[in-house]
Amino acid sequence: MLNSKKTNILLAAAGAAVLMASSPVLAQAPAEPTPAAAPAEAPTAMAPAADAANPSTVGESVGGGHSGGITPISMFMEATIIVKVVMIGLLLASILSWTLLLIKLFEFGALNRKTDNFLENFRGARTIADMRAVATQEEYDGNPLADMAAAATDEIEMSRQAGLSVTGDHLDNAMGRATAAVAAVQSGLAKRLSGGQQFLASVGSTGPFVGLFGTVYGIMNSFIGIAESNTTNLAVVAPGIAEALLATGIGLFAAIPAVVFYNYFNTRIAAYGTRADGFAAELLNGISRQLDKGA
């Protein structure tokens, strides 16, 4: 009985060995993955994420070769002909505005110095003849206040030479003619002092709009370039937009000083006009006083 059990066990073991030998899947045990195999792929998988997180890498890919290479001169050279014409016109207007500023500063400085000197000498005159002698001196030639004094005293002198009485009952007539002569000189005073003001006003009011025209034209060309290249890459459109905005910047550069100069010189002109009005009253009072004295 024992021999038959042993025989059955041996037969079962032999059958199991035959089955394992005949099946490759059962014969090979599944290999456990090594711990080092999984991390080996990690650097390759994480590389794109690292590049995406690096701002300098992204900036280089978007900006291309323009990083640090765009300057106002290069933008001007790359601009279209219309934008270039706008920029050149605005730059010329700005140069003329600054030139006009220097000219008028020297003009007003010399005018005030000559006026101060004239008033000092005029107030020392004792007769109408003395007033006329001071007003007609060559060093005061072209001075508005000296011209006013010369016109008033000349009118009195011409009335005398014509045989007209300038005193007594005829004093009012003589003073009326002298006043008219002074007013004629004063009427041209504002025009003499306001030379160049119209140019400054024009540059100050139209400069930003001219620059804006160049900007609109440049941006329009940039969008046309986007449509033709079928790309919205910032490196493609940024230079054109920068060139366009430069036109507006030059327009403001020309307009802002022009407006400042215009307001400044308007103030100077108004101040000198007030001074001229005061001198006119002083002049006519002096002439009337001398005529009453019979001088």
Image (cartoon, rainbow, N blue to C red):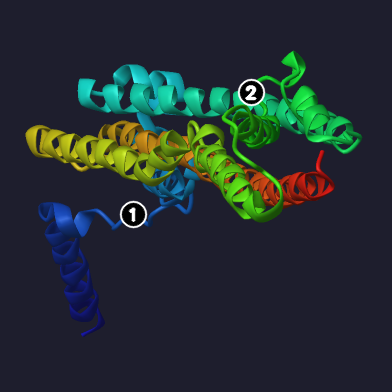
Instruction: Spot the residue most to the bottom.
Output: 1
Tell me if mark 2 has few (under 14), some (14-19) or many (20+) residues whose alpha carbon lies within 10 angstroms of its own. few
Q: Amino acid at mark 2?
A: Gly
Q: Where residue 5 appears, x then y in whole percent?
A: 21, 80
Q: Nearer the viewer, residue 160 or 226?
A: 160
Between residue 213 and residue 239, name the one nearer to us: 213
User: For residue 257, what is the image quadrant?
Assistant: top right
Residue at coordinates 9% horizontally, 39% vertically from top-left?
227
In the structure shown, which secondary structural element does the residue marked by tag 1 occupy?
loop
Q: Residue at x 76, y 18 (%)?
A: 137
Report whether 252 appears left or right of 111: left
Residue 65 seen in the figure: no
Quadrant of the frame with the N terminus: bottom left
User: In which quadrant of the rendered image does the C terminus lie?
Assistant: top right
In percent of width and height, residue 13 lies at 21, 67
Q: Dot 2 corresponds to which residue?
A: 142
Q: Residue at coordinates 71% horizontally, 47% vertically from top-left?
A: 167
Quick one: 56 or 224, which is closer to the camera?
A: 224
For the question of whether residue 244 can be seen, the reply is: yes
Give, as a three-letter code, the residue at label 1. Ala
Q: Measure the C-alpha gap from mark 2 to mark 1.
A: 113 Å
Give the labeled residue for mark 1. 31
Q: Earlier in the sequence, mark 2 or mark 1?
A: 1
Residue 20 at what x, y percent from top left? 17, 59
Q: Nearer the viewer, residue 28 or 82?
A: 82
Give the crowd class for mark 1: few <14, some 14-19, many >=20 residues within 10 Å. Answer: few
